[in-house]
Image (cartoon, rainbow, N blue to C red):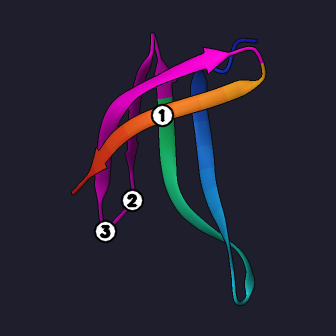
Amino acid sequence: MNIEGVWKLEIGGLHGWERLATVFLENSRYLSASADHYTIGKYLVDGKKFIAEASTW
């Protein structure tokens, strides 16, 4: 499964789905950002599993 590209990260909140960040996935590298934070890390796809290890500032 190829998941590389640009994604919209959303989270379920009290008022429905809220846009949290824009995520860039490329060559096992995870980068995301919004107006309030940025995140860097790495990811692995194992079958249907997506595993990410990242730090947010």
The residue labelled by disc 3 is 36
Q: CA distance from mark 1 to mark 3?
A: 20 Å
The residue labelled by disc 2 is 34
Q: CA distance from mark 1 to mark 2?
A: 18 Å
Q: Are marks 1 and 3 in contact (CB under 8 Å)?
A: no
Q: CA distance from mark 3 to mark 2?
A: 5 Å
x%, y% of residue 2?
70, 12
Mark 3 is on which residue type? Asp
Q: Residues within 10 Å of mark 1 (few under 14, many from 20)?
A: some
**SS at mark 1 in the image:** strand
Q: Place residue 48 in its image quadrant.
A: top right
Q: Residue at x 76, y 12 (%)?
A: 1
Q: Residue at x 50, y 48 (%)?
A: 22
Which of disc 2 and disc 1 is earlier in sequence? 2
The residue labelled by disc 1 is 52
x%, y% of residue 32?
40, 44
x%, y% of residue 47?
75, 14
